[in-house]
Image: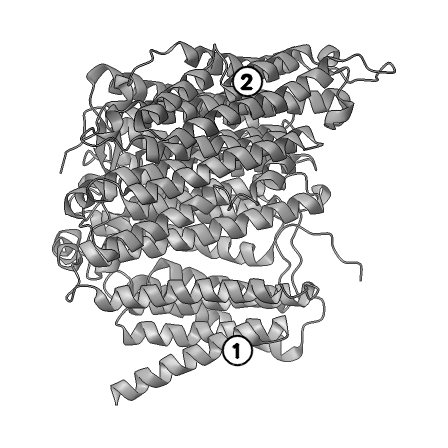
């Protein structure tokens, strides 16, 4: 039964991948790719990586929105020449085939740090080893990854016309939202927020955490903006900017405090690890939610004349 | 696993100081500042001090600096480490960034609340991100941590290319992004394979574990392939010339001098610290062969460019070629790589090219500001309009050609000796021809720049203080020619 389920998942994945590649219209390609992401999330669940599955699904929703937006703006480009396409396909097949072979050849059971990652959990007062990896053992990676997201946003802002760079971004569809969308934008956000807080809170002990929660909050925010219920914020607004950098800044500041107590950068004081980690997760969730929503909204733009 | 050194915290500061600047720049209004550059300069001073302290500590103690982040020892946690090579490069990066920043001040000084504030805000923020990323590449000891460094570097470097917002530079930036992301994906695939095989990503631990088997070689090959695209090694260089030529001159200087060196540095780490046993000679021949092709082909292409900045960008691709000769020239049976003259020559080439190329791009930027264009055919009069810049361009050119006195001369001489010792005559020939070609493309520009214009030119004055930053960089490239001609002890500190 499980084998049959896996076979169906893998077959669907392959069909969606081929559909995305072969679709003549960019829009169809993008939709196929979004479907691919959803099925991939299910595959992660089957592999026991629920944290990855949640992230895949959450990020897939936002990137899908971006891809769809881009396909509606972009003019259809000329197809690359046939030999080039064949060469690229050959190269991809070679890499994928090689990887498949190596993965099958890999030692079983694979050497892993999973056991070592579980051992200090009690001292950190955490139940989910993924959270311990992200906010204790490899906190530096997480800190710098959030800086990557900040840089991505700055890169996007730098694409604005000079006169509008501190202005509000354009929100697709906000000028004439459909009544069902307006209704949805009133009903859904409270539920979404509660779910997000739940995902964030249980992240300490079960699959879930800041990134998934932030994506959900960002999606709720975008829904409200796209339904025209609130105007998009001005990007030069100091409070907005403070929200953007607040999470990473607090994370960094607490990390530097670690030099004093207990004496090492990004180390948390004994007994206080859990509260510190929760504080950082809440701050990062807020910043990431704002960051992700702003990345989807894009650079400041001229107000379209009504 | 080694514990933290007493001064190991300096490594953390090298990463964190620019990040503090980056975060502060978004909220300048909150701290009562109107210009982003007012945040940049204190950060630059602090960062320079940190890099200087790391370099002097490593040189004085003769040992690598280590820091275990959060007290979580690898393989579970992350370590940072600066050996002799890293220390030299941290200092190099800090100096280049600081001098470029001094030059860039006049271009990116607008009030944050004005329309021109866009370029200033983006430039300084991205420069800070880029600096932190470079430092992490140099001190990271964990393959995934280094992946984060590469991501930081990509997202800081790509938007710098299209700061002026023209469609052509946007296209160049997108192409750069695609190459960089494919490179990242390949690197990440290799990293995952290595973790699956050995259960650790810490380079220090991997060094002890790696076996010469198919999985290891395939993983490292994938990673090196990805890094080659990021380092613009021929024939994966096609993204570089439009990107580096289209960026504002100070951004070009940082991109060409420092950013492409980061993936090369990681290839060196993988080659010498992760691959088991003596490196394979055929693989080294392939890398050196691509490097040789880069030197010959891209030098010729540089010679045929009509625009000064494009010429300098093609010269970058050619000069990167020299770095890849190192893999063949350090393969002496029975001798550790870092005791060969090929190692010293390669590292010296990296450092002297960084200073020379930064000088050249800044000088080209000043010349273009003075004349209002950078068409090589119409450069006549540049020698009068921006004499210091033209002089800096010429001095930097010495290093690219490999003429004394310059770091490039010593580097190329060492590489040439190493090639002769190794019996790799074809490499010796390529180094010599490459020098001649570089001489041709540099003198072509100088000849035009020193000529008298047919009609009096309307030129814009350029600030001497900004010209002097280019000159200082060029003088450092020259001064590197005074280092002793032996395997340089500093560059071997902390090697196993």
In the image, taking residue B342 as reference, residue B432 lies left or right, namely right
The residue under label 1 is A19
Where residue B473 sits: x, y (%)?
A: 51, 17
Within 10 angstroms of label 1, few (less than 14), some, or many (20 or more) residues?
A: some
* Chain letter of the residue carrying label 1: A
Q: Secondary structure at mark 2?
A: helix
- Residue at image location 42% in from the left, 32% down from the top: B426
- Residue at image location 13% in from the left, 54% down from the top: A116
Residue B248 in sight here: no
* Chain letter of the residue carrying label 2: B
The residue under label 2 is B396
Q: Which disc number belongs to residue B150? A: none
Residue A88 in sight here: yes
Residue B306 vertical placement versus A120 (above, below):
above
Residue B182 vertical placement versus B227 (above, below):
below
- Residue at image location 31% in from the left, 82% down from the top: A6
Q: Secondary structure at mark 1?
A: helix
Where residue B318 sits: x, y (%)?
A: 52, 33
Classify the position of the C terminus of chain A by image quarter. bottom right
Nearest to the eye among marks 1 and 2: give it. Answer: 2
Asked whether disc 1 touches disc 2, contact meaning CB atoms under 8 Å apart, the reply is no
Where residue A287 sits: x, y (%)?
A: 45, 51
Foreground residue among B148 and A201: B148
Classify the position of the N terminus of chain A by image quarter. bottom left
Foreground residue among B413 and B487: B413
Where residue B187 sits: x, y (%)?
A: 37, 51
In the image, taking residue B158 as reference, residue A138 lies left or right, namely left
Q: Which quarter of the picture shows residue B277? A: top left
């Amino acid at each position: 039964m499980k084998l049959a389920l896996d076979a169906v998942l893998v077959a669907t994945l392959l069909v969606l991948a081929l559909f995305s590649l072969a679709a003549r219209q960019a829009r169809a390609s993008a939709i196929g790719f979004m479907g691919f992401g959803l099925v991939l999330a299910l595959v992660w669940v089957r592999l026991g990586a629920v944290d990855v599955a949640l992230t895949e699904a959450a990020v897939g929703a936002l990137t899908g929105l971006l891809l769809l937006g881009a396909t509606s703006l972009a003019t259809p480009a000329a197809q690359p020449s046939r030999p080039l396409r064949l060469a690229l396909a050959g190269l991809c097949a070679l890499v994928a085939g090689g990887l498949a072979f190596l993965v099958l050849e890999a030692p079983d059971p694979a050497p892993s740090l999973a056991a070592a990652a579980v051992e200090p959990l009690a001292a950190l007062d955490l139940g989910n080893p993924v959270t311990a990896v992200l906010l204790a053992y490899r906190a530096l990676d997480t800190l710098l990854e959030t800086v990557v997201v900040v840089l991505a946003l700055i890169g996007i802002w730098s694409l604005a016309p000079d006169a509008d760079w501190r202005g509000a971004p354009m929100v697709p569809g906000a000028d004439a939202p459909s009544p069902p969308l307006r209704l949805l934008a009133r009903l859904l956000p409270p539920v979404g927020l509660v779910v997000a807080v739940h995902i964030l809170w249980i992240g300490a002990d079960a699959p879930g955490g800041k990134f998934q929660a932030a994506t959900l909050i960002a999606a709720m925010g975008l829904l409200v903006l796209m339904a025209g219920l609130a105007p998009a914020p001005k990007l030069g607004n100091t409070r907005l900017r403070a929200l953007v950098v607040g999470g990473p800044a607090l994370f960094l500041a607490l990390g530097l405090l670690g030099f004093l107590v207990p004496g090492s950068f990004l180390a948390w004081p004994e007994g206080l690890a859990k509260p510190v980690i929760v504080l950082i997760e809440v701050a990062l969730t807020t910043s990431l939610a704002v960051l992700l929503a702003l990345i989807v909204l894009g650079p400041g733009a001229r107000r379209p004349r009504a | 696993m080694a514990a933290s050194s007493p001064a190991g915290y300096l490594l953390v500061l090298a990463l964190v100081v620019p990040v503090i600047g980056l975060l502060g720049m978004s909220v300048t209004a909150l701290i009562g500042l109107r210009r982003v550059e007012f945040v940049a300069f204190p950060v630059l001073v602090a960062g320079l001090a940190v890099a200087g302290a790391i370099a002097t500590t490593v040189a004085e103690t003769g040992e690598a600096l280590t820091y275990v982040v959060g007290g979580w020892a690898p393989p579970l946690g992350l370590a940072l480490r600066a050996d002799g090579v890293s220390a030299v490069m941290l200092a190099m990066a800090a100096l280049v960034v600081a001098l470029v920043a001094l030059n860039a001040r006049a271009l990116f000084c607008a009030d944050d609340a004005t329309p021109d504030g866009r370029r200033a805000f983006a430039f300084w923020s991205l420069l800070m991100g880029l600096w932190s990323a470079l430092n992490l590449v140099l001190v990271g000891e964990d393959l995934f941590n280094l992946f984060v460094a590469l991501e930081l570097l990509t997202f800081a470097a790509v938007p710098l290319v299209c700061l002026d917002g023209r469609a052509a530079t946007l296209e160049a930036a997108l192409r750069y992004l695609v190459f960089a992301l494919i490179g990242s994906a390949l690197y990440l695939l290799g990293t995952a394979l290595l973790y699956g095989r050995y259960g650790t990503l810490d380079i220090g631990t991997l060094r002890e574990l790696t076996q010469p088997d198919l999985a290891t070689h395939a993983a490292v090959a994938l990673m090196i392939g990805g890094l080659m695209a990021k380092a613009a090694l021929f024939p994966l260089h096609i993204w570089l010339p439009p990107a580096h030529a289209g960026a504002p001159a100070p951004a070009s200087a940082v991109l060409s001098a420092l950013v492409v060196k980061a993936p090369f540095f990681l290839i060196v780490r993988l080659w010498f610290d992760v691959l088991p046993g003596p490196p394979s000679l055929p693989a080294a021949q392939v890398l050196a062969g691509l490097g040789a092709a880069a030197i010959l082909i891209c030098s010729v292409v540089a010679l045929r460019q009509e625009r000064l900045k494009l010429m300098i960008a093609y010269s970058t691709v050619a000069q990167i070629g020299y770095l890849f000769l190192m893999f063949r020239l350090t393969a002496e049976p029975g001798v550790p790589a870092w005791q060969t003259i090929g190692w010293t020559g390669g590292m010296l080439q990296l450092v002297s090219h960084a200073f020379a190329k930064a000088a050249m791009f800044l000088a080209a930027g000043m010349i273009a500001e003075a004349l209002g264009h950078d068409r090589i055919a119409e450069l006549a009069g540049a020698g009068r309009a921006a004499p210091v810049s033209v002089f800096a361009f010429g001095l930097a050119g010495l290093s690219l050609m490999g003429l004394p006195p310059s770091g490039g001369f010593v580097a190329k001489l060492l590489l040439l000796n190493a090639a002769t010792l190794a019996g790799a005559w074809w490499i010796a020939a390529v180094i010599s021809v490459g020098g001649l070609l570089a001489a041709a493309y540099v003198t072509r520009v100088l000849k035009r720049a020193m000529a008298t214009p047919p009609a009096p030119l309307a030129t814009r004055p350029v600030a001497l203080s900004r010209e002097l930053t280019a000159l200082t960089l060029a003088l450092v490239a020259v001064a590197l020619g005074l280092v002793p001609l032996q395997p340089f002890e500093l560059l071997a500190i902390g090697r196993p």
